[in-house]
Image (cartoon, rainbow, N blue to C red):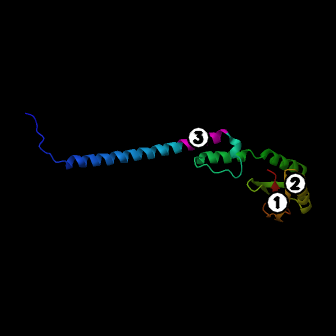
Amino acid sequence: MKRLQLDFSPHRARLRNVIGGAALTVCLLAGLALLASQRNLDQRITRYAVQQQQPWKRMGSHAKRDPLMLPEEKQSREAQHALDLPWNALLGALERVQSASSGVHLLSVQPNPAKGEVVLGGEAENFSILMNYVKALRAQPQFYDVVLVNQRLAPETTSQGRLAFTLLAQWKT
């Protein structure tokens, strides 16, 4: 036998239509929001790709930081910048002065490329040899403003009558 529909109330169908319409409207709004978000992301990716293809535009000191740049990429650029510094010129100048100066022994070389400084530590046989070493460093084109920061008698355990010194030189990077 055939099933009979005996409920003739219009309220149930109307409620179903209102709920269905509201659900359809919410889904359409969510879809539009996702579409706008996708379009914004596509524009950002396009700008980033163009920026990567034109490196001369991002080399300015006032360039905006790109939020899409990964920390690894930033770290690799800093490492590349450190490797691009004129290390051979710095070490070559120190070796030239060292080979011309007898009686001076460098014990430490501490470059600070961010400040453009080099801190030199060592020992000299006497004060006049030390001052000749400072003059020879000042004559090198890689250094300027070479200053004797401190001097003291070296500890007796390492050597007798020698001066321990620290020099600060500005490094032309």
Whether residue 17 is situated above or below residue 129 in the rendered picture: above
View extreme (left): residue: 1
The N terminus, quarter of image: top left
| Quadrant hosting residue 50 | top right
As rendered, which of 1 and 9 lies closer to the eye?
9
Write the residue at 83% across / 54% down.
105
Say the numbered circle drawn on residue 167.
1
As rendered, which of 6 and 60 lies closer to the eye?
6
Write the residue at 75% across / 57% down.
115
Report which residue position mark 3 lands on: 46
Amino acid type of the residue that numbered disc 2 sits on in the rendered structure: Leu
Badge nearest the viewer, 1 or 3: 3
Counting residues from the start of the chain, the first of labels 2 and 1 encountered is 2
Label 1 sits on a secondary structure element that is: strand
Report which residue position mark 2 lands on: 137
On the rendered structure, is 128 left or right of 87?
Answer: right
* Circles 2, 1 touching at the beta carbon (< 8 Å): yes
On the rendered structure, is 41 left or right of 125?
Answer: left
Residue numbers of the magenta segment: 42-53
Q: Residues within 10 Å of mark 1 (few under 14, many from 20)?
A: some
Give how far apart the Cα atoms at labels 3 and 2 are.
51 Å
As rendered, which of 138 and 37 lies closer to the eye?
37
Residue 155 percent location from the top left of the image = 79, 64
| Quadrant hosting residue 28 | top left
Give how far apart the Cα atoms at labels 2 and 1 are.
10 Å
Say the numbered circle drawn on residue 139.
none
